[in-house]
Image (cartoon, rainbow, N blue to C red):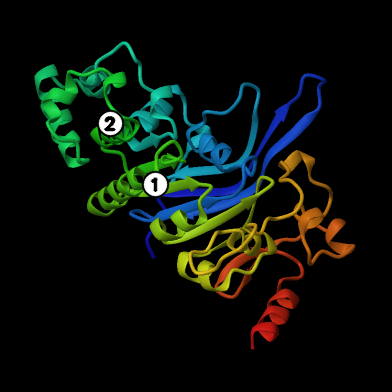
Amino acid sequence: MTAPLLELAGLTVDITTEDGGTRTLLDGIDLSLAPGEALGLVGESGSGKSMTMRAVTRLLPRGAAVSGAVRYDGAEVLAMDAGALRRYRDREVGLVFQDPRAHVNPTRRIGAFLIEALVRNRGVGKREALARAAAVLAEVGIDDPQRRLRQYPHEVSGGMLQRVMIASVLLAEPRLILADEPTTALDVTIQREVVGILDRLRRERGMGMVFITHDLDLALAVCGRVAVMYAGRIVELRSADTLHERAAHPYTLGLLGSRPSIDERAQRLTAIPGRPVSAFESGPGCAFAPRCGFATAQCETTPPALAEFDDGLVRCSRVEEIHAARTEATA
């Protein structure tokens, strides 16, 4: 069995509030990613998706307390000293964010942005670095790369600038890509192109990728496995195929049921009642219980464990009853 490229074990993140209290942002996250695998993280805003990836790179809010383990290729990230952490961030992990304009210096040319890390951290000469940058721009589908290197960020479209961001990640030749909502600011056509580029390059280069998105359909199309998050916890984890066909957690069922269909006409989209909560807002029982149509009094007081069910992992104490009732209803 191949050793994980990335492994999270019992990852918990707490922050201290101004009044001296403690708020939990992540609560016992267990995940693993194999080399070359694509893993999706799906959930509403505040579920902990982005915070999980910030913990992987130790880019957490000031004063955050982290427990558990974050292991990259067997090395404990949380125990790395400053030098090891810098090398890990610069060479092993590539970050693709949702808004490229917020992460590119608008006063510098695209070429200068792309080659900075190569020249500064790798000791590559400027001419060779520019040649590598042009080659990677062509690889991500940007025409006339030499001209693009001389342009400023405001001179290219949002979709092209996101490709530039992907190119900057590829130039570092990482083994792990963390893509945090990389298509949110793009129209549907450009979304498809950007996701296709990421997926193709992941396969060709054998990189592991964690793909964070609100779009469940997108995660199912891109990733081999999908983890559904709610209130700072994993509530369901299974292969994309079985999640689409045999989702088991009420929250996952709600997400799937709220998608618009091109085959049916409806006055309103189905919505999950209530509002999403963060980990520190949830009660002693199941965090989803206030919004769940299957919840009982026990659900509100007893926290469910993430347990094996139907070739996946599900955090729901009533999952077997719910599954049996749904199977009977569709028989």
Q: Give left or right: position of 295 versus 172.
A: right
- When the figure is inspected, residue 203 is found, relative to residue 110, above or below; the finding is below
The x, y position of residue 224, in whole percent, is 41, 61
**Residue 294, percent across and down?**
79, 67
Q: Residue at x 24, y 21 (%)?
A: 110
Q: Is residue 247 left or right of residue 120?
A: right
Task: Name the residue carrying label 1.
Answer: 188
Q: Quadrant of residue 232?
A: top right
Q: In the displayed structure, would residue 245 be above or below residue 258?
A: below
Relative image position of residue 144 (x, y in whole percent): 12, 31
Depth check: 247 or 169 in front?
247
Q: Position of residue 126 (x, y in %)?
A: 14, 17
**Residue type, mark 1 in image:** Val
Residue closest to the eye, 167 or 142: 142
Residue at x-position 20% and y-position 21% = 111
Identify residue for label 2.
164
The Cα–Cα distance between marks 2 and 1, rounded to whole angstroms, is 18 Å
**Which amino acid type corresponds to the residue marked 2 in the rendered image?**
Val
Tell me the quarter of the image containing the N terminus: bottom left
Q: Residues within 10 Å of mark 2 (few under 14, many from 20)?
A: many
